[in-house]
Amino acid sequence: MSRPTASLAAPDFKQAVALQFANRPTLRQIASRKILQLVVDHYPIIAATEPPLIDAEPLRLLTPQSVSTGTQQSLVQVVLQAVLDGTALNLERVNDGTHGIFLTEPYRFEGADDHKFIAIEGMTEAFNELVLELPYHFQQAQVDYWHGESSAGVSRDRWLQHTLKSALLRNLPLQDLDAQQLECISALYSAKTGRSHPP
């Protein structure tokens, strides 16, 4: 198997590794997709939007302050804040009003001329389960990402290992090591990789 890092110039190591980390799924991305799946399971009409939703970012949560007024917040942000604070959500009736979900521009429910408000009830338990599960979903997403195939044809985890080893070996001449020390490191590299010589 060829080493995907062999052709990288020394200054490119940092950029190449940074790009791999920059593309990792974020907690917000995971939360946004899981929230959309949750609300669609309870209210299938939310899946019928123009343009189609790919995550829950366009969803806003209306929290009633009175019968006729309420505050608006990003539904994703509300859930993430609950994860951060370690607190439970309460989406039941409050102040004689009902929590609801609506869409931000340019999203609209199919066939609707204006923004449609969907009252949500009985979802507190489901949302609180999601709040508890999100850290585990995020951890699994990281594992799946690093096990996934990179553009070099090997897993991202294996690619990162090769890159770090290649960077180490390319910098050895700058470390002022004697012949015995260099031989020791080369032997260690060979033992870990199964190669007889460093790149």
Image (tube, grey):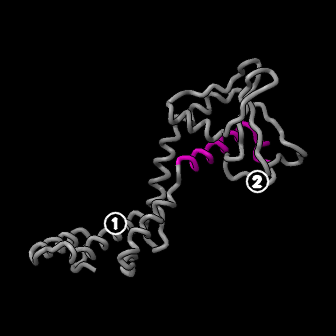
Q: Look at mark 2 in the image and give the residue it sits on.
A: 52
Q: Is residue 112 above or below residue 184?
A: above
Q: Amino acid at mark 1?
A: Gln
Q: Where is residue 67 shown, x and y percent of the image?
A: 80, 21
Category of crowding for the residue at label 2, using alpha-carbon neighbours closer than 10 angstroms: few (below 14), some (14–19), many (at least 20): few
Q: Where is residue 148 shown, x and y percent of the image?
A: 48, 63
Secondary element type, mark 2: loop
Report the number of discs. Answer: 2
Q: Amino acid at mark 2?
A: Pro
Q: Is residue 175 above or below residue 104?
A: below
For residue 155, side relative to residue 180 (left or right): right
Quadrant, the C terminus: bottom left
Residue at horizontal 67%, vertical 27%?
91
Q: Is residue 169 above or below residue 36?
A: below
Q: Is residue 119 above or below residue 168?
A: above
- Alpha-carbon distance for marks 1 and 2? 39 Å
Figure quadrant of residue 94: top right
Q: Look at mark 1 in the image and give the residue it sits on.
A: 161
* Helix, strand or loop: magenta stretch: helix
For residue 116, side relative to residue 143 (left or right): right
Which range is magenta?
A: 27-48
Residue at horizontal 22%, vertical 80%?
197
Q: Where is residue 152 shown, x and y percent of the image?
A: 45, 74
Residue at horizontal 76%, vertical 18%?
96
Q: Nearer the viewer, residue 135 or 59?
A: 59
Quadrant, the N terminus: bottom left
Q: Where is residue 62 shown, x and y percent of the image?
A: 73, 32
* N-term mark: 1 or 2: 2
Q: Is residue 47 magenta?
A: yes
Residue at horizontal 47%, vertical 69%?
150
